[in-house]
Amino acid sequence: MTGKLTTHVLDLYHGRPAKEMQIELWYKDPGGSRNPIRRVQTNDDGRVDRPLLAENEMKPGVYELVFDVAAYFLAQKVELTTPPFLDRVPIRFGIDNTDSHYHVPLLVTPWAYSTYRGS
């Protein structure tokens, strides 16, 4: 089995997958610097078209997914406060086993979010 990192986003405000949400993936090196890996956009199903990390891209360490929540809800014509309660939502997590599948979903509204390690 080869490891990979995937994500998806569910828009709980509208009750549907979050289409066209921007997501950034960062790696936090042992010295504390954040290094960008890639920027992607969710598809019609709220998923990205390929794993964020796969096979030889996987390495142990601390990663961060940053979801552009406010921009997504503004594009959906949701009236947000200024500044928005949630803007860019970071989720920092660790990868220790590069042979495992790490799935980090985001369930989100303009005012709340949750995540978990999925499968």
Image (tube, rainbow, N blue to C red):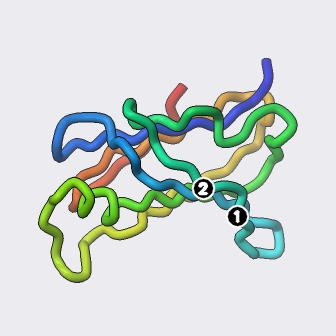
Extreme top residue here? 1
Query: Could you tell me which residue is drawn at 62 percent across and 33 percent down?
Result: 50
Residue 77 vs residue 116: left or right?
A: left
**Kind of residue at disc 1:** Pro
Look at mark 1 in the image and give the residue it sits on.
36
Quadrant into which the N terminus falls: top right
Q: Dot 1: within a 10 Å radius of its alpha carbon, few (fewer than 14), some, or many (20 or more) residues? A: few
In this orientation, which residue lies closer to the viewer: 112 or 6? Answer: 6
Look at mark 2 in the image and give the residue it sits on.
39
Query: Could you tell me which residue is drawn at 51 percent across and 60 percent down?
Result: 66
Q: Dot 2: within a 10 Å radius of its alpha carbon, few (fewer than 14), some, or many (20 or more) residues? A: some
Image: 111 above or below 116:
below
**Kind of residue at disc 2:** Arg
**Count of numbered marks:** 2
Image: 19 above or below 71:
above
Extreme bottom residue here? 82
Is residue 116 in view from this perspective?
Answer: no
Residue 102 vs residue 100: left or right?
A: left
Labels 2, 1: front one: 2
Secondary element under disc 2, as helix, strand or loop, is: strand
Residue 79 vs residue 66: left or right?
A: left
Q: Are marks 2 and 1 in contact (CB under 8 Å)?
A: yes
Identify the image quadrant of residue 95: top right
Residue 40 vs residue 1: left or right?
A: left
Residue 57's x, y, as percent? Answer: 82, 42
Residue 85's x, y, as percent? Answer: 25, 72
Report the Cα–Cα distance between label 2 and label 1. 8 Å
Identify the image quadrant of residue 53: top right
Residue 47's x, y, as percent? Answer: 47, 35
Residue 103's x, y, as percent? Answer: 56, 35
Query: Could you tell me which residue is drawn at 23 percent across and 53 percent down?
Result: 109
Quadrant into which the C terminus falls: top right
